[in-house]
Amino acid sequence: MTRPFRFGVNMVTPATGLEWGKKCRRAEELGYDVILVPDHLGAPAPFPALVAAAEATERPRIGTFVLNTGFWNPALLAREVATTDALTGGRLELGLGTGYVKTEHDAAGLPWGSPGERVDHLRRTIEELHELLGSTEHQPQPLQEPRPPLLVGGNGDRMMKLTAEHADIAAFTGAKAVPGDTSGALRHLTAEELDERVAAYHRFAVDRTEPAELNLLIQLVEVTDDRRAVVRPLLQHVPHLTEDTALALPTLLIGTVRQMADQLRAQRERYGFSYITVLEPSFEAFGPVIEELAGS
């Protein structure tokens, strides 16, 4: 069954209360279904920002995209999640990931660990949250039962397996970490590489009784009548790609509003991505695409 589109915007820039409320209301006006906040040093603190977003708006859900679980103790996180869900009228969607920027852990004085250790910590966090938030004895209680919807984002096989086991929403970054880089640099996956990652997820999810919603993070939205002119300057940042393969990246939306809408329809058919997230710098440019896809 084809899911209808949902659209989220990841708000990455700190702001005062008045500015924050204005941005969130603008996102609601443009038709976004979810207002999201990441978990990086230098970005807004997730939970107070989400409470403020919910206070400023009426319709959109709110969520983390995604929490760096290495920053969090599960018991303290359960308190934050339950409080935020209650204060926002049950609008919270909880996004979790392992974290991918070592320098942030160093700055926070927190251990980094191996990839396997970070995935293990994420698994323990998910399991403890499920136990704590699902208990009638836990205080505070979330409004949604047994807990807010869980989104898990990642790329490797261990993350795909964990996502298949636990997540209501499976989030694909369309990129993978650059080996040996500690700054969080990512390498874009080609359309064919993303085919393989989605297929891997479905292999792990074969025994699920309810299919997960599939999410894709869009890295760039550029409205233009000349797609090649836009992509050429980007090639210096993606030397492994040609002009044609860059234009075919699922994580880039370059073209007219109609072309972008057609691309997202085609990608939903090919991969199953119905929940589309864009970054804050693109949220105005993406608004007309939301309008074009309304009801799809």
Image (cartoon, helix red, strand yellow):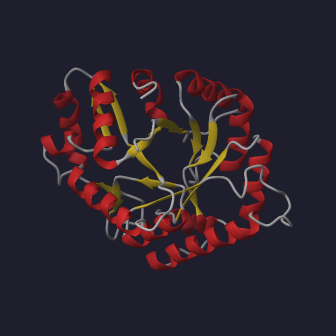
Please say if 196 is above or below 280.
below
- The answer to whether residue 51 is left or right of residue 223 is right
Q: Position of residue 263 (x, y in %)?
A: 28, 34
Quarter holding residue 156: bottom left
Residue 261 percent across, percent down from the top left: 33, 28
The image shows residue 60, relative to residue 127, as above or below, that is: above
Identify which residue is drawn at 33% across, 44% down: 251
Residue 231 percent across, percent down from the top left: 21, 35
**Quarter of the picture holding the N terminus:** top left
| Identity of the residue drawn at 58% across and 53% down | 39
Q: Is residue 157 above or below residue 57?
A: below
Find residue 77 and report its horizontal and vertical position in percent: 71, 62
**Which of the 4 image quarters holds residue 132?**
bottom right
Question: Which residue is located at x 42 percent, y 73 percent?
Answer: 158
Q: Residue at x 51, y 66 (%)?
A: 98
Image quarter of the C terminus: top left
- Residue 120 visible in the snapshot: yes
Place residue 19 in its image quadrant: top right
Out of 112 and 162, give the one closest to the viewer: 162
Can residue 73 be seen at all in this image of the molecule?
no
Q: Is residue 151 left or right of residue 77?
A: left
Circle count: 0
